Image (cartoon, helix red, strand yellow):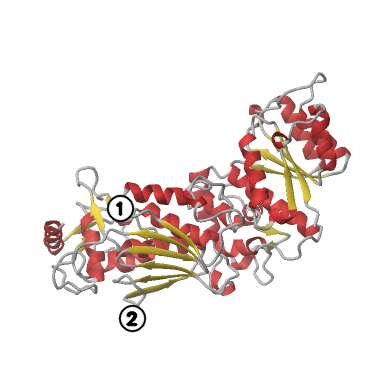
Amino acid sequence: MKKIKVFISSVQSEFAEERQILSDYLTSDALLGRFFEPFLFENLPAVNQSIFRTYLTEVEHCDVYIGLFGKEYGYEDKEGISPTEREFDHACLYHKVRLIFISRHDSKERNPKELNLIQKAEQVIVRKAFSSVFELKSSVYASLIHYLEEKEYIRTLPFDATLNRKATMDDLDVQKIENFVKLANQRRDFPLSIESSPDAILTHLNLLQENRITNAAILLFGKQPQRFFITSEVKCAHFHGRDITKPIPSYQVYKGDVFQLVDQAVDFVLSKIDVETGTRDKSNAVEVKYEIPRGVVTEAIVNAIAHRDYTSNASVQVMLFKDRLEVWNPGYLPYGLTPAKLRKPHNSIPANPMLAEPMYLAGYIERMGTGTGDIIRLSKEAGLPKEPEFVQEEFFRTIIWRKEKNEPTGQVDNPTSNPTSNPTSISEEMEFIGKVLLVVNGEVKRSEIQEALGLKDRENFADNYLNPSLQKGYIEMIYPENPKHRHQRYRLTKKGLELLSQLNKER
């Protein structure tokens, strides 16, 4: 099949990096790479003709014109016209498909001629705004998929961009959408506010078309995502040895939207690994340091949930062993990426871009293409015994190696219920209580304890940490007669102080 030529235009100096990223993305994406052939003027070999004639000829030969308009107008010819405007006019003259993406800047920041060009484009086509290269990639992806569908090159959209036949707006949780906007406003300067309608927010995220929602919208904001996608869950297991054995000492299956899945799975791992506390002279809630950095655990789990194959009958699996953490993802690396390349700087090629962009905007994905690099770096900084491993077999696996401890003579892998023994042998419940005691100093808020422990899931924190500590008398409320008092705080009891003293001696 002859490939569809895409001409990527812009002011060369202003969007040089973004243009190259788009070109690489179109070339390497498993779906888009089958259909599109991008053109960048910088990649053109030396030719015996004028630059002006060359890029206009390429516009004539292209099928799709992508224009990136920003603040600068760029070089002007003797008539005072920039190459970008010449290209756009030529694309209009030859009736090319024109996709225009405009950076989010105030009109006062733009060159007056660039502003006029933008206004000219707005008169003839619908354009999209972007504030980051991540958002730009997502919008370009959605536009090109729509192009392929309209031209009937494809009849089935990628999973995350597919409009769900059964779901409606009533299946989405408006409160979840508002919570997302609050996070995205704080972390990524998301341009819409919580006063915006759910329709406007979803449309901006390319998750709503003609009053129909995409699969990604359900996974992100659904009231019950597993009602539509039964395997979109995370299975977590903790084994005291080095192998998968039954019975499994601790096993949980988590359901919910993708943000809840990440929070619950990360909290599960953190609840099972060792933690060290810092000094108590800076704040009431003491800083904690987990044996595997929280950032490593989070990156591995986020990558699995964001990039998994949602058409698979398998689920993401998180398994903690005595010597390692393994995160299994039912999916394959995109074409052109290998486990070896993941260890070096590489472009981000999300398997589910409609899902990945909101996770980026909410702060769950930090930067493009840096997740595996961050896992390696943070593991080294924490002094873990071996570098993380990335393995592509039937599943994609991320393996994080733990520091193994020398067990006392006669010690077995399975812990006992003796609360006075060392931290590797106390019961699971007492482990949770011990972690609470280590971070409580004076009178502290519930949120301060949860934040100090690095836990995100409120229900998990209450069920496994706070409530058992209260019920067994290790901490107490300062307003026990009114548990929901707006000034409620928690403090150690005499029993809690005694256990804390014992724990500190054993550290």
**Of marks 2 and 1, which one's residue comes earlier in the chain?**
2
* Res 46 → quadrant: top right
Query: Taking 291 as reference, is 11 above or below it?
Result: above
Secondary structure at badge 1 equals: helix
Q: What element carries label 2?
A: loop
- Identified by mark 2, the residue type is Pro
Q: Which circle, 2 or 1, is nearer the viewer?
A: 2
| Residue at far top of view | 78
Q: Which of 351 and 288 is in front in this view?
A: 351
Give yes or no for contact between labels 2 and 1 (Cβ–Cβ under 8 Å).
no
Q: How crowded is mark 2: few (under 14 residues within 10 Å), some or many (20 or more)?
A: few
Q: How far apart are marks 2 and 1 (CA)?
A: 33 Å
Left or right: residue 142 versus residue 309 is right
Looking at the image, residue 407 sits to the left or right of residue 270; the answer is: left
Q: How many other residues sit within 10 Å of disc 1, few (<14), some (14-19) or many (≥20)? A: many
Quadrant placement of the C terminus: bottom left
Residue at the spot x=13%, y=70% of the render? Answer: 409
Circle on res. 318 = none
The quadrant in which residue 249 appears is bottom left
Residue 33 in percent (x, y) is at 69, 53
Q: Which mark is residue 247?
A: 2
Count every numbered label the image shows and give the total.
2
- Position above or below: 184 against 260: above
Q: Is residue 182 visible?
A: no
Query: Could you tell me if residue 367 is visible in this image?
Result: yes
Q: What residue type is labelled 1?
A: Ala
Question: Where residue 180 sits: x, y (%)?
Answer: 52, 54
Could you say which quadrant of the image residue 407 lies in? bottom left
Query: Which disc is residue 452 wearing?
Result: 1
Where does the N terminus fall, quadrant-wise?
A: bottom right
Relative image position of residue 360 (x, y in whole percent): 53, 50
